[in-house]
Image (tube, rainbow, N blue to C red):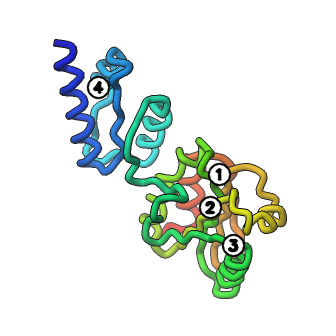
Amino acid sequence: MARKWVVGSYSMAIAHAIRNRVRPMLLNRLPSLSLSLSLSLPLPSKPSLFATAVVSSQLSFLPSFHHSHSLSSSAAPPSGLVLINSEEEFNTILTRVRDDSLHAIFYFTAVWCGPCRFISPIVGELNKKYPHVTTYKIDIDQEAIQGTLSKLQISSVPTLHFFKNGKKADELIGADVARLNHITEKLFKKD
Protein backbone atom coordinates (compact mmCIF):
# COMPACT_ATOMS: atom_id res chain seq x y z
CA MET A 1 0.00 0.00 0.00
CA ALA A 2 2.77 2.45 0.97
CA ARG A 3 4.68 1.58 -2.21
CA LYS A 4 1.59 2.30 -4.29
CA TRP A 5 1.17 5.66 -2.55
CA VAL A 6 4.83 6.62 -3.16
CA VAL A 7 4.52 5.75 -6.88
CA GLY A 8 1.36 7.85 -7.01
CA SER A 9 3.18 10.76 -5.38
CA TYR A 10 5.89 10.53 -8.06
CA SER A 11 3.23 10.82 -10.73
CA MET A 12 1.71 13.82 -8.97
CA ALA A 13 5.13 15.46 -8.55
CA ILE A 14 6.03 14.94 -12.20
CA ALA A 15 2.62 16.18 -13.38
CA HIS A 16 3.00 19.24 -11.14
CA ALA A 17 6.50 19.86 -12.51
CA ILE A 18 5.34 19.62 -16.11
CA ARG A 19 2.30 21.82 -15.50
CA ASN A 20 4.32 24.53 -13.71
CA ARG A 21 7.61 24.09 -15.60
CA VAL A 22 9.65 23.47 -12.46
CA ARG A 23 12.17 20.84 -11.37
CA PRO A 24 10.44 17.66 -10.15
CA MET A 25 11.67 16.29 -6.83
CA LEU A 26 12.24 12.57 -6.28
CA LEU A 27 11.36 11.63 -2.73
CA ASN A 28 12.13 7.90 -2.84
CA ARG A 29 14.75 8.02 -0.09
CA LEU A 30 12.45 9.64 2.46
CA PRO A 31 8.92 8.21 2.06
CA SER A 32 7.76 9.62 5.41
CA LEU A 33 8.93 13.09 4.30
CA SER A 34 7.15 12.50 1.02
CA LEU A 35 3.90 11.84 2.85
CA SER A 36 4.22 14.86 5.14
CA LEU A 37 5.21 17.16 2.28
CA SER A 38 2.29 16.20 0.10
CA LEU A 39 -0.12 16.68 2.98
CA SER A 40 1.29 20.00 4.18
CA LEU A 41 2.28 21.68 0.89
CA PRO A 42 -0.67 22.20 -1.43
CA LEU A 43 0.18 22.54 -5.09
CA PRO A 44 -0.80 26.08 -6.08
CA SER A 45 -1.90 26.73 -9.63
CA LYS A 46 0.70 29.50 -10.03
CA PRO A 47 3.37 29.52 -7.27
CA SER A 48 5.08 32.79 -6.43
CA LEU A 49 8.79 33.24 -7.14
CA PHE A 50 9.49 33.49 -3.42
CA ALA A 51 7.50 30.36 -2.51
CA THR A 52 9.16 28.36 -5.27
CA ALA A 53 12.61 29.49 -4.12
CA VAL A 54 11.93 28.75 -0.46
CA VAL A 55 10.53 25.28 -1.10
CA SER A 56 13.30 24.53 -3.57
CA SER A 57 16.01 25.61 -1.12
CA GLN A 58 14.50 23.62 1.74
CA LEU A 59 14.40 20.49 -0.39
CA SER A 60 17.72 20.98 -2.17
CA PHE A 61 19.27 18.00 -0.35
CA LEU A 62 16.93 15.65 -2.17
CA PRO A 63 17.93 14.08 -5.48
CA SER A 64 16.47 15.76 -8.54
CA PHE A 65 16.62 15.69 -12.31
CA HIS A 66 16.22 18.22 -15.10
CA HIS A 67 16.04 21.82 -14.02
CA SER A 68 14.23 23.69 -16.78
CA HIS A 69 15.25 27.14 -15.50
CA SER A 70 18.96 26.37 -15.16
CA LEU A 71 21.33 29.25 -15.83
CA SER A 72 24.50 27.19 -15.58
CA SER A 73 27.26 27.77 -18.11
CA SER A 74 26.47 24.56 -19.95
CA ALA A 75 22.80 25.41 -20.53
CA ALA A 76 21.52 27.79 -23.15
CA PRO A 77 20.57 31.07 -21.49
CA PRO A 78 16.95 32.23 -21.46
CA SER A 79 16.11 34.85 -24.05
CA GLY A 80 17.15 38.30 -22.90
CA LEU A 81 20.01 36.97 -20.75
CA VAL A 82 23.40 37.80 -22.25
CA LEU A 83 26.51 35.80 -21.40
CA ILE A 84 29.73 37.78 -21.05
CA ASN A 85 32.84 35.74 -21.80
CA SER A 86 35.74 38.20 -21.73
CA GLU A 87 36.99 41.39 -20.13
CA GLU A 88 36.82 43.19 -23.48
CA GLU A 89 33.19 42.15 -23.94
CA PHE A 90 32.34 43.27 -20.39
CA ASN A 91 33.98 46.68 -20.89
CA THR A 92 32.19 47.19 -24.22
CA ILE A 93 28.80 46.35 -22.70
CA LEU A 94 29.38 48.45 -19.58
CA THR A 95 30.37 51.42 -21.75
CA ARG A 96 27.23 50.97 -23.86
CA VAL A 97 25.01 50.73 -20.75
CA ARG A 98 26.54 53.95 -19.36
CA ASP A 99 26.63 55.90 -22.65
CA ASP A 100 23.09 54.96 -23.72
CA SER A 101 21.63 55.34 -20.19
CA LEU A 102 20.28 51.78 -20.21
CA HIS A 103 18.77 49.65 -17.47
CA ALA A 104 20.87 46.56 -16.76
CA ILE A 105 21.68 43.87 -14.23
CA PHE A 106 25.18 42.37 -14.11
CA TYR A 107 24.88 38.93 -12.50
CA PHE A 108 28.19 37.50 -11.27
CA THR A 109 27.87 33.78 -10.63
CA ALA A 110 29.68 30.42 -10.61
CA VAL A 111 28.57 26.93 -11.60
CA TRP A 112 29.78 25.42 -8.31
CA CYS A 113 28.00 28.02 -6.12
CA GLY A 114 24.94 26.69 -4.24
CA PRO A 115 23.39 30.11 -3.53
CA CYS A 116 23.88 30.99 -7.22
CA ARG A 117 21.94 27.87 -8.25
CA PHE A 118 19.28 28.85 -5.72
CA ILE A 119 18.80 32.36 -7.12
CA SER A 120 19.34 31.62 -10.84
CA PRO A 121 15.72 30.66 -11.59
CA ILE A 122 14.56 33.85 -9.89
CA VAL A 123 16.98 35.96 -11.94
CA GLY A 124 15.59 34.21 -15.04
CA GLU A 125 12.02 35.04 -14.02
CA LEU A 126 12.93 38.67 -13.33
CA ASN A 127 14.49 38.77 -16.77
CA LYS A 128 11.07 37.85 -18.19
CA LYS A 129 9.17 40.19 -15.84
CA TYR A 130 11.28 43.22 -16.82
CA PRO A 131 11.98 42.83 -20.55
CA HIS A 132 13.21 46.44 -20.75
CA VAL A 133 16.14 45.49 -18.46
CA THR A 134 18.97 43.42 -19.93
CA THR A 135 20.59 40.90 -17.61
CA TYR A 136 24.25 40.10 -18.23
CA LYS A 137 25.60 36.88 -16.73
CA ILE A 138 29.29 36.66 -15.88
CA ASP A 139 30.82 33.34 -14.77
CA ILE A 140 33.60 34.31 -12.35
CA ASP A 141 35.63 31.17 -13.12
CA GLN A 142 36.49 32.32 -16.63
CA GLU A 143 40.17 33.26 -16.93
CA ALA A 144 39.36 36.05 -19.41
CA ILE A 145 37.29 37.96 -16.83
CA GLN A 146 39.62 37.87 -13.79
CA GLY A 147 40.94 41.42 -14.27
CA THR A 148 37.40 42.83 -14.27
CA LEU A 149 36.55 40.94 -11.10
CA SER A 150 39.55 42.48 -9.35
CA LYS A 151 38.66 46.00 -10.50
CA LEU A 152 35.05 45.60 -9.36
CA GLN A 153 36.13 43.90 -6.11
CA ILE A 154 33.85 40.91 -6.71
CA SER A 155 34.80 38.57 -3.87
CA SER A 156 31.50 36.73 -3.27
CA VAL A 157 28.89 35.16 -5.49
CA PRO A 158 26.16 35.64 -6.31
CA THR A 159 26.69 39.37 -6.74
CA LEU A 160 24.31 41.51 -8.76
CA HIS A 161 24.98 45.08 -9.88
CA PHE A 162 21.89 47.06 -10.86
CA PHE A 163 22.14 49.94 -13.34
CA LYS A 164 19.30 52.39 -13.90
CA ASN A 165 19.63 54.92 -16.70
CA GLY A 166 23.29 53.98 -17.11
CA LYS A 167 24.28 54.57 -13.48
CA LYS A 168 24.93 51.95 -10.83
CA ALA A 169 21.91 52.22 -8.56
CA ASP A 170 22.29 49.24 -6.22
CA GLU A 171 24.18 46.05 -5.46
CA LEU A 172 23.15 42.72 -3.97
CA ILE A 173 25.61 40.23 -2.54
CA GLY A 174 24.15 36.84 -1.68
CA ALA A 175 20.94 35.01 -2.49
CA ASP A 176 18.48 37.29 -0.65
CA VAL A 177 15.30 36.78 -2.70
CA ALA A 178 13.22 39.34 -0.80
CA ARG A 179 15.86 42.04 -1.29
CA LEU A 180 16.31 41.06 -4.96
CA ASN A 181 12.59 41.47 -5.56
CA HIS A 182 12.54 44.76 -3.62
CA ILE A 183 15.46 46.23 -5.58
CA THR A 184 14.05 45.25 -8.97
CA GLU A 185 10.58 46.56 -8.10
CA LYS A 186 12.03 49.83 -6.83
CA LEU A 187 14.34 50.38 -9.82
CA PHE A 188 12.60 48.85 -12.82
CA LYS A 189 8.84 48.70 -12.27
CA LYS A 190 7.05 50.72 -14.88
CA ASP A 191 4.28 52.88 -13.42
Q: Which residue is mark 4?
A: 38
Asked which quadrant contains residue 92, the reply is: bottom right
Asked which quadrant contains residue 128, the reply is: bottom left
Farthest residue to the top: give it.
1
Side of 56 relative to 31 (left or right)? right
At horizontal 77% and vertical 57% (from top left) the residue drawn is 154
- Label 3 environment density (alpha carbons within 10 Å; few <14, some 14–19, many ≥20): some
User: Sequence order check: which comes first, mark 4 or mark 3?
Assistant: 4
At horizontal 69% and vertical 75% (from top left) the residue drawn is 90
Whether the residues at callouts 1 and 2 have beta carbons within 8 Å, the answer is yes
Amino acid type at image mark 3: Ser
Whether the residues at callouts 3 and 1 have beta carbons within 8 Å, the answer is no
The numbered dot on residue 158 is 1
Compared to 71, does 36 lie above or below?
above
User: Sequence order check: which comes first, mark 4 or mark 1?
Assistant: 4
Could one spot residue 191 in this view of the protein?
A: no
